[in-house]
Image (cartoon, helix red, strand yellow):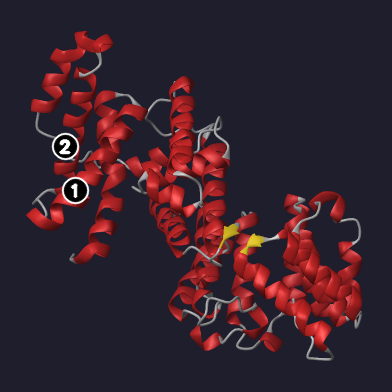
Amino acid sequence: MTGAASLEDLLRELAPQALGALIRRHGDFADAEDAVQEALIAAATTWPASGRPDHPLGWLIRVASRRLANAYRSDDARRRREALAASWSAASPEPPSGRDDTLILMFMCCHPSLTPALAIPLTLRAVGGLTTREIAAAFLVPEATMGQRISRAKARIKASGERFALPSPGQRPERLRLVLHVLYLLFNEGYTGSSGPDLARADLSGEAIRLARAIHAAMPEDPEVAGLLALMLLTDARRPARSGAGGELIPLAEQDRSRWDRGLIREGTGLITGALRRGNVGEYQVQAAIAALHDQAGRQADTDWPQILALYARLESMTGNPMVRLNRAVAAAMTSGPQAGLALLDGLGERLGDHHRLHSVRAHLLEQAGDRGNAIAEFRAAAARTTNLREQQYLTTQAARLAAGPGRPAGP
């Protein structure tokens, strides 16, 4: 591997392995994680000039162990541990254990005591190998603020007394559900940023895919793990056609489908097909099946909307999620006309509040129904409520287009 990108990939791959080795050896998640971060920064700054060591993982473990030892030495309250610290820094690094430390770390970072706002940054730092500055930049908050969030997350894990081991068989399904939910949120934030000047953050969605692949490699028989990975791949396959040369949003109906990544579509379709055959169907598998139907349509007109509508109905019965009802309304409109979709939106504001997507979908359906004035008002309301600049520009443009006079109706 050569170049900055390959070095970054290597460090992200080695980060959880080095952290796992330190936690197994020294026991403290927070201190070990800080030491590994310092070792990763040292590697990123010294390896390009001095050359990559023959055993990169051993180098990281050794440097992190020394940083951890120095931290203990500098703490007056821990002077009694100096002898132990000296043995840590002098000893040769342990060889990789062969255990799946990445999976254990993800379970720890998605501890039930953590909210997603804490679990996602901790996962990116501990498992993804990102620095606090990189994570802060991704979420558009000051580095100090993100540092505080990560510190709170580590403090809660320490207070929980969590052992460095996979959860017990009885706890594992619920804990796995939390891990998958965190990765799902991370991917969504990367695919459409909740705020900021860019439509998407490919680094965040790419990291979610990488971590989902790691879980799938460790748990290849779990259908929901396969379903989530399939959903990410099938969705990310459309990314090249999702924005124009100037970064503007291009809706699904108007995308150049020849630019979709056919390799990702084949991989994702294969994963979801295999997962559904196992018979234990969960919500990520249903979402992946919907994504596959979109990706397999050569044109918008070829989309199997009745099947998508049926799948959204099943997904809503499984989750009760109002966002699913919103998507179901779009499918209903494409199957039976805009009035069918608008009927499904009735009362949804009580559950979604003043969410910009509710206004956006209603605007599209009102336009299809020929209600230009109310469609303009809804597009403007949606634009006023989104904090993603690219979505805001798209919605404002739609309102201006309708206000300018008759034109081609746009699909939702």
Q: In the image, is 331 to the left or to the right of 175?
A: right
Q: Secondary structure at mark 1?
A: helix
**Residue at left offset 52%, top offset 72%:** 269
Q: In the image, is 250 to the left or to the right of 11?
A: right
Question: Is residue 279 visible from the viewing direction of this image?
Answer: no
Q: In the image, is 15 to the left or to the right of 56?
A: right
Q: Which mark is residue 43?
A: 1
Mark pair 2, 1: CA separation? 9 Å
Residue 335 vs 175, above or below: the answer is below
Amino acid identity at mark 1 = Ala
How crowded pointer 2 is (Cα within 10 Å; few <14, some 14-19, many 20+) is rated as: many
Amino acid identity at mark 2 = Val
* Mark closer to the chain start, 2 or 1: 1
Q: Nearer the viewer, residue 277 or 120?
A: 120
Question: Is residue 63 visible from the viewing direction of this image?
Answer: yes
**Residue at left offset 16%, top offset 16%:** 84
Q: Circle 2 is placed at which residue position?
A: 63
